[in-house]
Amino acid sequence: MNSFLKKFLMAAFGIAFFALSFLPCVFAQQAVNVSLPAFKITMNDVVINNNERLYPIIVYRDITYVPMTYNDSRFLGLETKWSSDSGLQVNKTSVQLSYNPEKGYGYPSLESAFLPEFRIRVNGKDIDNKNEPYPLLVFRDVTYFPLTWRYMVNEFGWTSSFDPYNGLIINSKASSTTTTTSTVGSKVFSQDFGSITVIFDRSTNSQPGNLYIKENNAIKKIGNPNYIYGVGYLQAGTYGEYTAVDKVEYANRWVYTLAVDPSVSPITSKNVRINIDTNEVQATDGSTISDTNKISTQVYSKDFGSVTVLLDRASDKQPGNLYIKENNITRKIGNPNYIYGVSYFKLGPFETYNPDNNISFVDRWVYTLAINPSASPLTSKKVRVNIDTNEVQLVR
């Protein structure tokens, strides 16, 4: 090769390299900023020491993310598989290992996380991760899962709760052995709905707390233990009779049936639905199952289209005063021990509770002020309340 040709090729290569160095990196992974949670985390009754973890639990867009390491995924009852051909697969299993963190975290600040570019499947279903509001992330070369309702409840069957004082509490339902968590009488009516079986204890038609579900080979009692489920009530003069009604439906983690509250007068059966994760009972015929959902005539309300948020203003010191109205049904939401829509001020021995009507509603969350009367010192904090799960989160 003559010297002219060598010089030409070297110059061409240099120009190409120089030009490429200034091209936008369209093939690079998208980086996002993450942070460490500022609240306490408890998973399967284990308080997590995030400071000791090589792969810490992180927060992105106000959603907590957990790493899918071998130990962490098995601790939560999940199995992960990865290959360059099929990508990442995450499946719920019936095996749960003890907590075993990979220690080594000691960095004062966090580097960026990235959106993965490989295929992702959860319980056999493809995830369009780029279009997810809370996508899976890769942090320190480990895939992280968002703890959203979709994944925690719908896919993995976990339960969770959050408040500013206890932090985030997560319980997976995986079990290393087949267990029976509740005892049902020998006389039962049951109806199968695939992964869920609904069971009525028919030992007697007037027996409260007679509703159970079977899921993952474990049986548990659900609903309000003082109610009688799957029964009708007929009053004839001074004589009343409970009659078994084997009518039950199941959809989206809710059991639909009849229920009777024996403590109210007059006794009557009502159509209700029961959440199998939270045990919440809601009337589905526009009425209330008991006095717990009755609201005073002194209310402040704000309409957000299909949902109306209400604050019971009978007293500025009244806990459990937050309600929503949806589909013509009014129900209480949030932690029943908190006072909502109220600010607190203390000067020396004097204190005042003042109504605050600053309310917003976004993506099934109600944003308002709240006071925990059992906390010391008392203070009002901005929170958000999920109208489906009653979860209360501190907003910073």
Image (cartoon, grey):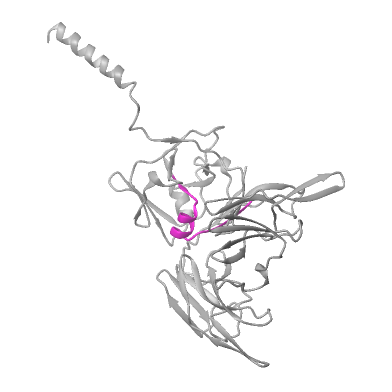
Is residue 245 or residue 294 the one in the foreground? 294
Q: Residue at x 43, y 42 (%)?
A: 137
Query: Which residue sits furthest left?
Result: 1
Residue 179: x percent and y percent? 49, 70
Q: Residue at x 69, y 81 (%)?
A: 265
**Left or right of 235 in this view: 155:** left
Q: Report how many numbered discs are placed on residues in the image.
A: 0
Asked whether residue 164 appears in the rendered view, the answer is no
Residue 238: x percent and y percent? 68, 92
Is residue 121 or residue 369 the one in the foreground? 369
Above/below status of 322 relative to 216:
above
Above/below status of 335 relative to 24:
below
Residue 223: x percent and y percent? 58, 71
Above/below status of 260 relative to 38:
below
Q: Quadrant of the N terminus?
A: top left
**Left or right of 41 in this view: 77:** left
Magenta residues? 144-163
